[in-house]
Image: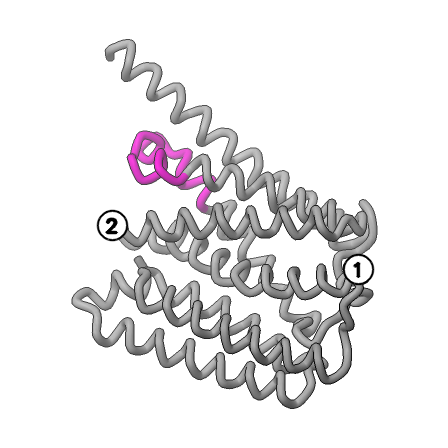
Amino acid sequence: MTVTSRRSATADLVRGSVVAVLAVVQIVVSGLGGSGAVGESVGVVARDYATPLLAAGWAFVIWGPIYVGFLAYAVYQLLPSQRGREVHRRTGWWLVASAVLNPAWILAFGARLIPVAELMIVGLLICLATVFGRLSREPASGVLERIVFRGPVALYTGWVSLATVLGTAATGVWAGLPGTGALPAIAAVVVLLAAAGILMWVVLSGTAVVGYAAAAVWALVGIVLGDAPVAVAGAGVLAIVAVVGATARRITTAGNPVRAAFG
């Protein structure tokens, strides 16, 4: 083994170990922040800055599968056969950043540092979108990679795509904008329709779109079945239909449907 290869192997091990540690850290912080043991409960703060886009409380259980998926990925990328793969070198540090920003967002939101929390979740979306985009450039190496790497990243990215929208709306209320009434409802309809367009574009151009679309649709269903006004719920239903339709089209017209669906 040359000096260069030894350095690369060491760098790969360091990166993989950092990912694994942070995968556990974000679960611990999520448990503490979600329960209110550290700061206020995320749910309590969210309700204090409620908007027509606030999803029903049950929708947030998706964080469980997201964290489990990230933990599975952390174990997978740390395997000796995986550490040196270029796909992990191109995405690993971005996912490290995501695992720092996630607990940072929880702590900031629980402390009612809403603008700081907004910056954290926007940064989180940038990190995840970067990884999602890079993974779309090449097929997965096999079924295991699709299950413990491509799928979890897609699910995470899809959820945070909508969570960022919800967070931005809450930040607006924090800044003094109204959270109820006709004007916020109209704004919410416009935002949902615009978000649907972006989600469709991502689905029609990416891979592993099943996980991404599933998380996005889950978030939209949470909005529709929350306390949304009728017009907002209607826009949410249209967004759901649009995303599901785009997903079906992406898979059925792809040269490699399995790659389009699962990476």
Task: Residue at the far top: name it.
Answer: 3
Q: Classify residue 262 as left or right of residue 172.
A: left
Q: Splitting the image into 4 quarters, where does residue 221 fall?
A: bottom right
Q: Amino acid at mark 2?
A: Glu
Quadrant location of the N terminus?
top left
Residue type of the residue flagged with mark 1: Val
* Picture residue at 24% right of the left edge, 50% below the top: 138
Q: Is residue 22 left or right of residue 145?
A: right
The numbered disc on residue 45 is 1
Instruction: Count neighbours of disc 1 (C-alpha within 10 A) and say few if under 14, some if 14 to 19, many if 20 or more.
Output: some
Image quarter for residue 167?
A: bottom right
Question: What colouring method underlies this structural image?
Answer: one colour
Left or right of 17, for residue 230: right
Q: Position of residue 51 (x, y in %)?
A: 72, 72
x%, y% of residue 220?
A: 56, 75
Q: Residue furthest left?
A: 255
Which residues are drawn in magenta? 73-91
Cβ atoms at labels 1 and 2 below 8 Å apart: no
Residue pointed to by mark 2: 138
Position of residue 143 measured from the top left corner of the image (x, y, whole percent): 29, 54
| Residue beneath the point at 40% across and 22% down | 11
Residue drawn at x 57%, y 70% as measured from the top left: 219
The alpha-carbon separation of the residues under discs 1 and 2 comes to 40 Å
Quadrant of the snapshot with the C terminus: bottom left
x, y (%) of residue 235? 55, 84
